[in-house]
Amino acid sequence: KLYHEPYRLQAHFSPKEKWTNDPNGMVYYKGTYHLFFQHYPKASVWGPMHWGHAVSKDLIHWKQMPIALYPDKLGYIFSGSVVVDENNTSGFGTKDKPAMVAIFTHHNPKGEKANTSAFQNQSLAYSLNEGVTWVKYLGNPVLKNPGIKDFRDPKVFWYAKDKKWVMSLATKDRITFYSSPNLKDWKKESDFGQMLGAHGGVWECPDLFPLKLNGKEYWVLLVSINPGGPNKGSATQYFVGHFDGKNFTPSSNQTKWIDYGPDDYAGVTFGNTGNRKVFLGWMGNWMYANEVPTVKWRNAMTIPRELSLKLAAGDIYLASTPVKELNKIATQTLDVDALQLAKNNNIFSVIKQTPTQYVLKFNTAAVKDYAVVLSNAYGEKLVVGYDAANSRYYIDRTKAGQSAFNKQFAAIAYVPRVSLLPTSNFELLVDVSSVELFADGGLSTLTGIYFPKKPYTSLGIINNGMEIEKLQIQPLKSIW
Ligand code: FRU
């Protein structure tokens, strides 16, 4: 049955069929969240890129729509963003009926093959019917390649202070900012990052947006990088700083990652959500994305996450937690009795339903090792826990299931604990083939996918005698 095949995620978006990678063009408009996505509709591997399209009223239940953008003579449709042109600066709509405008990279495969360097250019398309059908602009490309091989993934927003559009663009080993009055004419403002952050691979999929901390405004710049992530392969780093409409200036030089796990890549935020910032990433990694053992469709998106800035250990961090809308699919919560928790060193229970959210809370200054173990009768187990000696959280999928498809897959992923508070909270979102850990209120985050032969049926909690203040098990309904 569609959406119920082996490994099909039940609380996350994945395409009905075939390939996906990056989320694209995420925007909220007229009560609907739009999610476009890198899509190859003819096979379950990467190929000539299209923009698939899905819509949601609540960020949780998705309905797949017809393909929004097809490749054309200028090339494949690579990643990019969508804005609502409320002031009709582009002239594509009217003030009463503004256009949705997509700004994306045209990737010319012929130019790539011929070993030229200018085969990635930025182009426009617009929709006058809320994203159902799209018209490509005849003046494409609007931002021509100056001779940089990697020149892609435009993310555009309206910078109200200067009444102009600002574009962040990944240009090989840095982010270049451009501005425009009308989305058609672009002027270079500045470069950022050549000497900062991680550079183990090419920079991709930037996003720049403001967030407040204690009433003060900061700007956050997300930059995906592949390879060179903290647990190998693809990952997304971020910088916190200031933006004046031209230049981005970071306030700290430390490299930080929005998610240390192997399977959260190319994520950006939804446009048009006001002060709220909702992030969503591709739940995959270029090391093995083309080989994971699903057949009908391949790859999915993370759960949408609410972003906030938090102070920890004298620095400013970006925290992420599942959006509150996830509660819409929550069923009755099981609160495990405190007495039982205190007495037992190892707590076991039967897993009746997946997806499930698990919340553990420890209220002690001396946090010891602990772990949540999901397992089946075939000896397969997924372990997610805390390593006190090294003060780090981890996902261990070395024995979680199938891994022969790629030798990099069976590994342990770590994230340092940054919170210094004695209270430790540990929130897990477990779906049929994915796990997302949000620890310490989302200050430490890890995402990983896994593929057991048969679903896990048993839950174990190892707490080494440490008192668990709270254990909550919350089964979730399928979104399909
Ligand atoms: C990131 C990425 C982007 C590019 C797209 C192509 O995963 O490499 O830089 O636009 O995927 O599918």
Image (cartoon, rainbow, N blue to C red):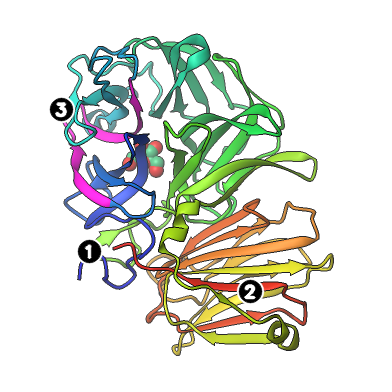
Q: Earlier in the sequence, mark 1 or mark 3?
A: 3
Q: Residue at x 59, y 15 (%)?
A: 244
Q: In this view, does 24 lie above or below 283?
A: above
Q: Do the residues labelled 2 and 3 touch (CB within 8 Å)?
A: no
Is residue 66 covered in magenta? yes
Q: Residue at x 49, y 51 (%)?
A: 323
Residue 27 coordinates in the image, percent (x, y): 37, 35
Q: Please give the residue where the numbered disc 3 appears in the rendered image.
A: 73
From the viewer's side, name the closer residue of 100 and 22.
100
Magenta span: 63-85
Q: Mark 2 points at which residue?
A: 471
Q: Where is residue 224 drawn, in percent x and y?
A: 50, 40
Say which element carries label 1: loop
In the rendered image, residue 207, in percent from the top left (x then y), is placed at 49, 32
Viewer-side label of 2, 3: 2
Q: Is residue 380 above or below residue 101?
A: below
Query: Mark 3 or mark 2, which is nearer the start of the sequence?
Result: 3
Badge 1: residue crowd in 10 Å (few <14, some 14–19, many ≥20) = some
Q: How crowded is mark 2: few (under 14 residues within 10 Å), some or many (20 or more)?
A: many
Look at mark 1 in the image and give the residue it sits on.
Answer: 296
The quadrant of the image that shows the N terminus is bottom left
Q: In which quarter of the image is ligand 1?
A: top left
Q: Distance between the residues labelled 2 and 3?
A: 56 Å
Q: Compared with residue 165, is residue 1 higher up or lower down, i.e. above or below?
A: below
Q: What residue type is labelled 2?
A: Leu
Q: Quadrant of the C terminus?
A: bottom left
